[in-house]
């Protein structure tokens, strides 16, 4: 049975079908197909949703039932793979973690969706991640140890592990890097994510490559390009204190003490 009631100015129009509240949202998506489009353009799709739906569900509805040409990345859909980072209402987020109830205030409201900034757009919401991963690889994001291989596990105290615990959470979604105004305007800047992943090993007591990484980040396009706007910290879906990590790398460079 369907029950309908009129909404006041402050309320949504709600329809109850089998106990589920149904609302309508307009997804305004920035589209670009290099094979047919000279410039990106906006297209709007009306999608039925429930407040508990994730934005990724609605994008799937568009692709599955309205326009199969819509292109976007997704994988795990649980905020772990980081593949579905995009700008949602002007803010970098993972589509799989954004609940529509946090975006909507009334029926028929519009949600804007566009690709993350600072990276070349390949098609629709998909960007070329190679510049991002090139910066990531450049900081040597792996354990460096010299000498003979140990005959037993490299032990580490809980306190030493806690020193870099926060920066182990990075899922390489590029939400932080592509929220950075410096990165938008300077394609050579390493970006927050690369610095975060360098931090993870610079402060690892088992690692012996800290000086190498610090020298890499002491470059003109390294940590000194950061302007401490906190965009990166706000954008991180894992809650990493990105700006704090960057400042710690700066201090390590200044004092060469890690």
Image (cartoon, grey):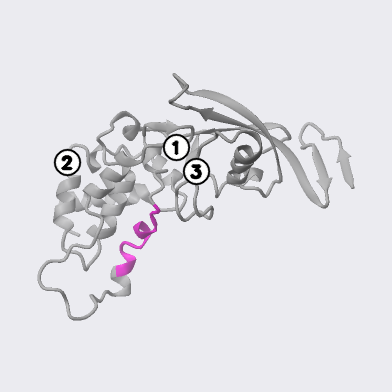
Residue 231 is left or right of residue 246, and the answer is: right
Whole-angstrom CA distance, mark 2 to mark 1, is 30 Å
**Residue 163 location in percent, x, y?**
31, 64
**Residue 165 location in percent, x, y?**
35, 63
Residue drawn 17% across the image and 44% down it: 218
Q: Which mark is residue 219?
A: 2
Density class for disc 3 (Cα within 10 Å; few <14, some 14-19, many ≥20) is: many
Mark 2 and mark 3 residues within 8 Å of each other at the beta carbon = no
Q: Which mark is residue 240?
A: none
N-terminal-most mark, 3 or 1: 3
| Residue 166 vertical placement versus 116 (above, below) | below
N-terminal-most mark, 2 or 1: 1
Q: Nearer the viewer, mark 2 or mark 1?
A: 1
Q: Nearer the viewer, mark 2 or mark 3?
A: 3
Q: Is residue 166 magenta?
A: yes
Q: What is the secondary structure assignment of the residue under circle 2? A: loop
Inspect this view and state whether residue 92 appears.
no
Q: Which mark is residue 126?
A: 1
Residue drawn 58% across the image and 36% down it: 68
Residue drawn 27% across the image and 74% down it: 156
* In front of the other: 24 or 59: 59
Which quarter of the figure has residue 192?
A: top left
The span picked out in magenta is 161-171
Residue furthest to the top: 38
Residue drawn 33% across the image and 47% down it: 193
Mark 2 and mark 1 residues within 8 Å of each other at the beta carbon = no
Whole-angstrom CA distance, mark 2 to mark 3, is 29 Å
Q: Where does label 3 land, which residue?
A: 93
**Residue 53 location in percent, x, y?**
65, 48
């Amino acid at each position: 049975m369907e029950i309908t009631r009129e909404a006041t100015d402050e309320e949504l129009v709600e329809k109850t079908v089998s106990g589920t509240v149904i609302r309508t949202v307009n997804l305004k998506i920035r589209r670009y197909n290099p094979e047919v489009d000279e410039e990106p353009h906006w297209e709007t799709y009306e999608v039925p949703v429930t407040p508990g739906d994730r934005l990724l569900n609605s994008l799937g509805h568009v692709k599955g039932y309205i326009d199969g040409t819509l292109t976007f990345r997704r994988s795990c859909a649980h905020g772990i793979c980081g593949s579905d980072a995009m700008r949602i209402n002007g803010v970098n987020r993972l589509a799989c973690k954004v609940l529509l109830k946090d975006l909507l205030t009334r029926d028929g409201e519009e949600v804007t969706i566009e690709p993350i900034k600072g990276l070349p757009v390949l098609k629709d919401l998909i960007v070329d991640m190679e510049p991002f991963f090139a910066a990531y690889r450049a900081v040597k994001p792996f354990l460096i140890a010299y000498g003979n291989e140990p005959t037993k596990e490299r032990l580490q105290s809980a306190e030493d592990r806690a020193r870099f615990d926060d920066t182990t959470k990075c899922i390489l979604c590029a939400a932080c890097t592509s929220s950075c105004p410096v990165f938008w305007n300077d394609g050579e800047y390493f970006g927050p994510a690369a610095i975060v992943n360098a931090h993870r090993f610079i402060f690892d007591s088992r690692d012996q490559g800290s000086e190498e990484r610090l020298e890499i980040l002491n470059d003109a396009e390294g940590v000194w390009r950061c302007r401490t706007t906190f965009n990166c910290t706000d954008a991180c879906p894992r809650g990493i204190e990105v700006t704090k990590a960057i400042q710690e790398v700066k201090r390590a460079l200044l004092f060469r003490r890690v």
